[in-house]
Image (cartoon, grey):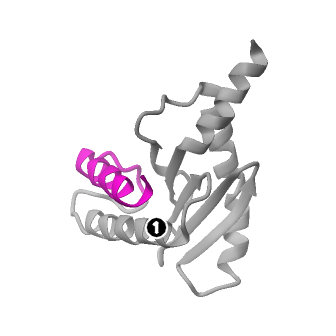
């Protein structure tokens, strides 16, 4: 019984996308995107996904010194999952855990989310590098994810 649930968890992990915006000291925004028609991931798979993303932070810092590009591409691979990263000029990290998507769709996703983030940061009621609680921002990020990552 335990082995069949772990098999379901690993196949579900490929259908799950985890997106995190990380500030200087803490995560600012988190979203899970499930492929249409699939169930949510188990708690252990979700914890593992967060661990993979957070463990990739050191690799992001290292990769940031090797290029002037904001889009750092895939910075880490664990099992069949990859961590792609976009680094803003203000050192805010957009990180996406995925099971292997086209580079163009990921880059377009990051570009559109960056545009949303810039608009949010221009809002006088949002303080830079604080957790993002805007429901409008969340709705728009999810719409961008459906457009590029489905």
Pointer 1: what residue?
105
Whether residue 122 is visible here, answered yes or no, is: yes
Task: Give how far across and how far down residue 80 sits, in percent.
Answer: 71, 50
- For this orientation, the residue located farthest to the bottom is 68
Read off the magenta span: 130-150
Q: Nearer the viewer, residue 46 or 108?
A: 108
Task: Give how far across and how far down residue 130 sits, in percent.
Answer: 41, 54
Q: Residue at image x 26%, y 44%?
A: 135
Task: Give how far across and how far down residue 95 sits, in percent.
Answer: 55, 59
Which quarter of the picture shows residue 45? Answer: top right
Looking at the rendered structure, the number of numbered marks drawn on it comes to 1
Whether residue 47 is visible here, answered yes or no, is: no
Q: Residue at image x 34%, y 50%?
A: 142
Q: Nearer the viewer, residue 72 or 102?
A: 102
Residue 144 painted magenta: yes
Q: Is residue 101 left or right of residue 113?
A: right
Residue 131 painted magenta: yes
Q: Is residue 129 left or right of residue 50?
A: left
């Amino acid at each position: 019984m335990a082995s069949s649930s772990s098999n379901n968890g690993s196949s579900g992990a490929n259908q799950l996308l985890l997106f995190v915006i990380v500030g200087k000291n803490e995560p600012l925004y988190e979203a899970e995107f499930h492929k249409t028609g699939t169930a949510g991931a188990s708690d252990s798979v979700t914890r593992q996904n967060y661990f993979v993303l957070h463990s990739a932070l050191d690799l992001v810092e290292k990769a940031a010194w090797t290029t002037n590009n904001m889009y750092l591409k895939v910075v880490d691979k664990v099992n069949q999952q990859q961590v792609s990263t976009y680094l803003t000029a203000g050192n805010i990290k957009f990180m996406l855990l995925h099971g292997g998507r086209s580079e163009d769709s990921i880059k377009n996703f990051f570009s559109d989310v960056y545009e949303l983030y810039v608009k949010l940061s221009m809002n006088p009621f949002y303080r830079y590098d604080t957790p993002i609680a805007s429901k409008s921002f969340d709705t728009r990020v999810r719409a961008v994810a459906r457009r590029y990552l489905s």
